[in-house]
């Protein structure tokens, strides 16, 4: 079968920065509490006129430039998001229009913070089977639009941004293994109850704040540590590798305590971890691709490095991917 690999990356975050000191004026919290509990110091917030497709488009254009590809060469666009511009059409279709990828198919994929890993896995299968030759995978979120800014337990966590990669056939290396899992019994640990067919938008649903993120923090924390361990252990077994074979680990940037707990269990040295959540907060499906793009541009990723991507999210979902970087 054809090998699938990442041949270009790009990212975009809004210009406006919301610091912990700003949140101290909005809700009952402190910079010390936020940094100690999460590791987050600031996050980027989209303005009122910026939607998911806007950030996704900018990240996509940068990824195309990085891969030296034109929009006409894109066969498929996958956007992983929980904050689409609207229920339909798909945000991927809006991105297709914006970048002029007139020959591509397009669809959205929703798996919470694990969404980018799900999208990357789907893209790799299309490449490996020869169905498509060049796929744009984007994780894009404007979580600030669904955050309850009066809920101090959640509003300190989330930020906005988008990351994109170009997946294509490669001669060597590339995506070595994927691992995906889900447990729907934990769906109500992290969800947004309003806006769908179960609880469509009404005056009552808005007044009851059903269109905002709801999270049971302690339960999600416990799940996340277990999920990170499971996803790491199983992907290494599938690839017949050990953690010593991995050159850099890029985890979902949700909470530094979660990442550190998982790293301790696998004895991952700090220099192998790439962490940027202090600057961006939790960007859900955009978290991993933004970190991947940043790590590459900073020179933290070199040709032939083995990269472990690992994440967890609403659903509940979790997953991982090992890539041998080949460009």
Image: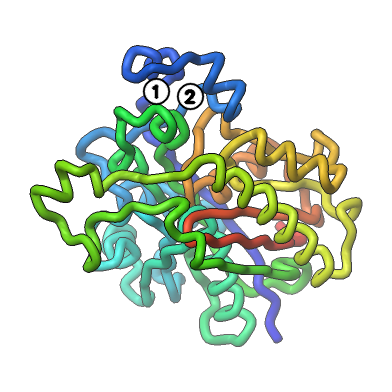
- Image coords of residue 275 (percent x, y): 66, 35
Identify which residue is drawn at 88% across, 69% down. 240
Q: What element carries label 1?
A: strand
Give 53 or 319, whichever is nearer the viewer.
319
Q: Is mark 2 on a helix, strand or loop?
A: strand
Circle on res. 42: 2
Disc 1/disc 2 C-alpha distance (Å)? 6 Å
Q: In which quarter of the image is residue 268?
A: top right
Could you tell whether 48 is left or right of 302 in the image? left
Identify which residue is drawn at 58% across, 86% down. 130
What residue is disc 1 on?
A: 18
- Image coords of residue 62 (percent x, y): 47, 49
Identify which residue is drawn at 48% across, 48% down. 284
Q: Is residue 209 above or below residue 231?
A: above
**Number of numbered discs overlaid on the protein picture:** 2
How many other residues sit within 10 Å of disc 2, few (<14), some (14-19) or many (≥20)?
A: many
Q: Quadrant of the C terminus?
A: bottom right
């Amino acid at each position: 079968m054809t090998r699938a690999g990442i041949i270009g990356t790009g990212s975009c975050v809004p210009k406006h920065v919301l610091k912990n000191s700003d949140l101290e004026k909005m809700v009952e919290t402190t910079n010390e509490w936020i940094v100690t509990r999460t590791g987050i110091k600031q996050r980027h917030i989209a303005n009122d006129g910026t939607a998911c497709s806007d950030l996704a488009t900018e990240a996509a254009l940068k990824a195309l430039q990085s891969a030296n590809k034109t929009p006409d060469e894109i066969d498929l666009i996958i956007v992983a998001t929980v904050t689409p511009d609207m229920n339909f059409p798909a945000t991927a279709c809006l991105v297709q229009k914006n970048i002029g990828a007139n020959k591509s198919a397009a669809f959205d994929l929703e798996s919470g913070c694990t969404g980018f890993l799900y999208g990357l896995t789907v893209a790799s299968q299309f490449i490996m089977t020869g169905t498509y030759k060049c796929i744009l995978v984007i994780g894009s979120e404007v979580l600030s639009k669904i955050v309850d800014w009066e809920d101090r337990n959640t509003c300190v966590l989330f930020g906005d941004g988008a990351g994109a990669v170009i997946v294509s056939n490669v001669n060597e290396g590339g995506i070595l293994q994927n691992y995906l899992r889900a447990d729907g019994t934990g769906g109500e640990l992290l969800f947004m109850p309003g806006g769908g067919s179960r609880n469509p938008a009404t005056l009552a649903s808005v007044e009851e704040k059903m269109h905002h993120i709801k999270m049971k923090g302690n339960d999600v924390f416990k799940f996340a540590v277990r999920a990170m361990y499971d996803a790491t252990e199983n992907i290494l077994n599938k690839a017949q590798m050990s953690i010593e074979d991995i050159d850099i680990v890029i985890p979902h940037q949700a909470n530094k305590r979660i990442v550190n707990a998982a790293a301790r269990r696998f004895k991952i040295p700090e220099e192998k971890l790439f962490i940027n959540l202090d600057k961006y907060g939790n960007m859900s499906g955009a978290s991993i691709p933004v970190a991947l793009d940043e790590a590459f541009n900073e020179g933290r990723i070199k040709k032939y490095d083995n990269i472990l991507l690992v994440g967890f999210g609403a659903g509940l979902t979790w997953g991982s991917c090992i890539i041998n970087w080949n460009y």
